[in-house]
Image (cartoon, rainbow, N blue to C red):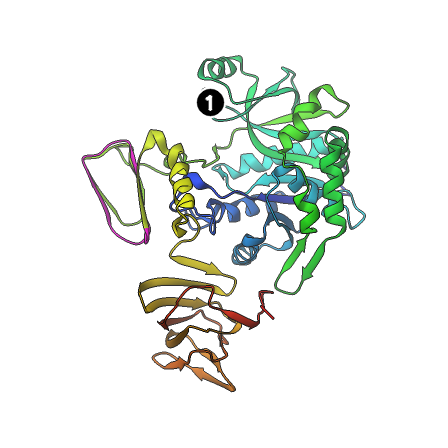
Amino acid sequence: MSSGLTPSIVQPVILCGGSGTRLWPLSRTGFPKQFLCLTGTESLFQLSAKRLVGLASPQFRILPLLVVTGEAYRFLVNEQLRESGIQLGAALLEPVGRNTAPALTLAALAAIESGEDPILAATPSDHIIENVEAYTVAMQKAIREAEQGNIVTLGITPDRPETGYGYIQAEHVTSEHAYKVLRFVEKPDLTTAKRYLDAGNFFWNAGVFVVRASVWLAALTRFRPDIAETTCIAWSDKREDFSPTQNFIRPNPEAFTAIPSESIDYAVMEHGPDSEFAMKVVPLEAGWNDVGAWDAVWNALPKDERRNAYQGDVIVQDSRNILAYATSRLVSLVGVENIVVVETPDAVLVADKTRSQEVREIVRTLSKEKREEHMLHRKVHRPWGWYDSIDEDERFKVKRIQVNPKASLSLQKHHHRAEHWIVVKGTAEITCGNKIFLLTENQSTYIPLGELHRLYNPGMVPLEIIEIQSGTYLGEDDIVRLADDFGRSDQ
């Protein structure tokens, strides 16, 4: 354990992949569950980041956050951390998903570049923790164990015979901080899960890992040298994109694609108990929920006297054990039991609550039919703000657009459509051809087909406009970007 004079250096890491298909239609590929506010006003990702930052103490110096995520989510990560006031050390952008072992390896390689060897505190981005204080205590215990060279994981103390999680078997040894791991076991059947619960030394595997960066790299090299080698090759040819507003690091895409896809558990943890690498589990009793499907969301929400949970504008009559989630309209339920109803502007889900895991089959069907509802919401987030397509027909589309303060859309033009802009809130700086001018509330302008144009918010409050598009083709791919603040230029 470190002395009080020299605090241990801890590198917080969030593994932020996955699309959360079982929480469709709220979670979609373009805006997955970790960025959703399911139980309050902060997203699961923001809550994960706050918990890691909260590990700071006189004994532990917490470095700026590392987030391992996909290219498509880089601006969501940036914006949500900005909203929370949390410093981003860097977003490590995977060109393709290769599971958690390569992701943690990227974080380890980034962590040691400064010449230090910090302890990695790596967590998923999409879990609920009700008791943050208990989580902090458990994580700090895990960090102390990692200081001794151990590979540490958090084990959730089970309260039921769950068949949907992997388990960790621990040795029955009294310890101030942790138990020795005997083995990792796969998701059991119900009979086996009951036996694990009765035994008292089995924990659910939460996917939280605490380990010194050099120890992780050594263990991966020992058990999966192919993953270690190929990830190092991709990292050595990385491209860095640092500015006052963004910190992105991209490993070489071709080399990264060659990395075998594997989880931390399969790559290292399952080999560890019989190896030279000591593995420990720290128990966690903190109201943990992996929010894996809509029944788990129901478990996490407060309920009325009939066990109904709801969010948004919902009226329930003579119903019990239901989850109703409304985002844009009134949802009313009469005389129903054990169902999930999730309403969004462009899709509604109704499902038996006990079969909520099967929602992903709907997403697969949408994908096969090449429908956009599995990819994007009607309201689409962009690095500069968002737009909501509120109406459209064959030759017109109406959008509500919000631009963040000091943010700008790209300098662009369209081959097939003209646009009318009406300012409804804030101040807009308009570039149209060789003219630059300001518009305020209730003023409007016209962008002719093919004209070079740009929209910028010079103010300190969000800018909102109504955009009316007209033309022969209104697809989002009819955009030619000549300059862009976010690296999306076509020139």
In this view, the residue in front, 182 or 221, is 221
Mark 1 residue element: loop
Image coordinates for residue 90, horizontal then vertical, percent: 65, 53
* Left or right of residue 239: residue 296: left
In this view, the residue in front, 6 or 321, is 321
312 falls in the magenta region: no
Residue 400, placed above or below residue 158: below
When asked about the image quadrant of residue 147, the answer is top right
* Left or right of residue 228: residue 139: left
Image coordinates for residue 72, horizontal then vertical, percent: 55, 54
* Neighbours of disc 1 within 10 Å: few (<14), some (14-19), many (20+): some
Q: Which residues are magenta?
A: 323-346
In this view, the residue in front, 328 or 316, is 328
Q: Quadrant of the C terminus?
A: bottom right
- Observer able to see residue 181: yes
Name the residue rendered at 52%, 58% in the picture: 83
Q: Quadrant of the N terminus?
A: top right
Name the residue rendered at 31%, 64% in the picture: 392
Residue identifier under label 1: 163
Give amino acid for label 1. Answer: Thr
Image coordinates for residue 407, horizontal then vertical, percent: 52, 70
Name the residue rendered at 39%, 72% in the picture: 465
Name the residue rendered at 52%, 49% in the picture: 46
